[in-house]
Amino acid sequence: MISMLVSSLCLTACSVSSTPAGDTIPALAVSSGRLDTLVAAVQAANLADALSSEGPFTVFAPTDEAFGRLDEGTIEALLEEPGRATLARILTHHVVPGRLEARDLVELDSVETLAGTTLPLAALKGRLLVDEAIVETANLNASNGVVHLIDRVMLPPVQVSPLQELMTMTIDRGVPLYNNGDPGACCAVYATALDAVTLSSGWGLTPNQIENIRGALQNANNMQDDGSRAWAYRRIIDALLQNQQMSSTSRPQPTDAQKVFTFEDRSELQGWRIVLDGVMGGLSTGNLSLENNSMLFTGETSLKNNGGFSSIRCAVPEGVFADSDSIKLRVRGDGRTWIMGTRKSTSMGGDSFWTRFKTTKGVWEEVTIPIDGMERHFFGQKAPGSISPDQVKAIEFYMYDKKAGPFSLEVDSIEGVNTSA
């Protein structure tokens, strides 16, 4: 059964090479003619020696075309300091210890990478999928492992820093106190954590950022009302979580909104992935760019080969919507009906929760989507189940209205809101 499946996979999704195993993995990549960008990335991240060692390793190697899907500015930033640490983590997210050929991979549900991350595996309609990448060419044999060419760069889950962990824990402990009528106790929790940030090192903050936080803290400490002071502390915490520059002269004000994306910086695009119907053999396209401080998703849907969808997806910090009941969007669409989705996992899978919203061509609109009202879909089919705000680990946009043609969605902001507040 396994041999038949491998044969099917190789006939419809990938070619299998019988490359002699004389070269190391880096040398094989250099000679392939399709991995020049990967070779440059490996050299920039100082990983060539490690990948030339005894191993063995299994490498899922993005082709030059796969790197071409990324924004040019993103690639340039990763190839230079200080982006090389991030680049090294992305590359090791593509490397698995041991020699795993196609026949081995189809027997597994997932593999663990050298980055300490997990890559889900799936065999779908004769295609071997690694996370959201399709294996185009399998079993390029090297002296110290095996290489499989894939059609996209796979981004690892967002790493949570010690500062993010502390701030998230602080919110988790403070919010119940505030909601149970004890804002004073909430203030004590928030203030203690923020004092720890300003009085100790190791949080990755610059001296200027520390001083700005101290100024904002002083403003908050001078407030007499416990409720207002709690909100002031919370805004400082939210700013830290979003890595925003604090201004010591500005006074945080209470709000019922949690900004998740504002697209004021190109770095906010880095975590977004394009997922097309190519995994099913479809021919739809998708492109992502930053235009006028907005995320622009364009492309064309095709109904050929049972296709018809194009989508983008991004992981979000765990718990970012925990204090919200809805997701608020500011978008400018194309007149077509779109899908806003959420996920309980950052992995590929087929399990997500959808709400459709209509757009008016060329008009900026605000759309508010209740999270607990989103419908569960498994590989596009409606299924029983629900998602709660604290379970959201990824969000997505789908163009999937069973129509062929060009599409365009401009997203100005994404935020969590509490409509019952």
Image (cartoon, grey):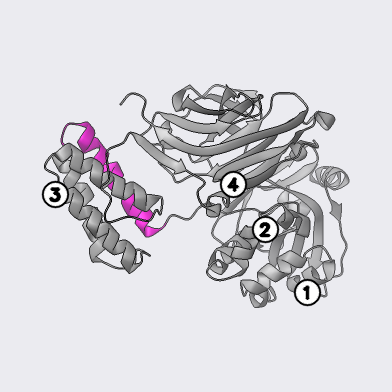
Residue at left offset 17%, top offset 31%: 181
Residue at left offset 56%, top offset 37%: 411
Tag shown at residue 222: 3
Residue at left offset 29%, top offset 59%: 212
- Seen in the picture, residue 297 relative to 46 is either above or below; the reply is above
- Magenta segment's dominant SS is helix
Whole-angstrom CA distance, mark 3 to mark 4, is: 41 Å
- In terms of secondary structure, where does tag 1 sit? helix
Q: Nearer the viewer, mark 4 or mark 1?
A: 4
In the picture, the quarter occupied by the C terminus is top left
Q: Disc 4, disc 1: CB below 8 Å? A: no
Label 3 or label 1, whichever comes before in sequence order: 1
Question: On the picture, is 98 further left or further right than 158?
Answer: right
Instruction: Determine crowd level at label 1: few under 14, some 14-19, many 20+ residues with C-alpha closer than 10 A.
Output: some
Instruction: Determine crowd level at label 4: few under 14, some 14-19, many 20+ residues with C-alpha closer than 10 A.
Output: some
Q: Amino acid at mark 4?
A: Trp
Question: On the picture, is 112 further left or further right than 193?
Answer: right
Residue linked to disc 1: 27
Q: Amino acid at mark 1?
A: Ala
Is residue 8 covered in magenta? no
Which corner quadrant of the image does residue 253 belong to?
Answer: top left
Residue linked to disc 2: 72
Whole-angstrom CA distance, mark 4 to mark 1, is: 31 Å
Label 4 or label 1, whichever comes before in sequence order: 1
Q: Is residue 350 visible?
A: no
Q: Amino acid at mark 3?
A: Asn
Whole-angstrom CA distance, mark 3 to mark 1, is: 64 Å
Whole-angstrom CA distance, mark 2 to mark 3, is: 47 Å
Label 2 or label 3, whichever comes before in sequence order: 2
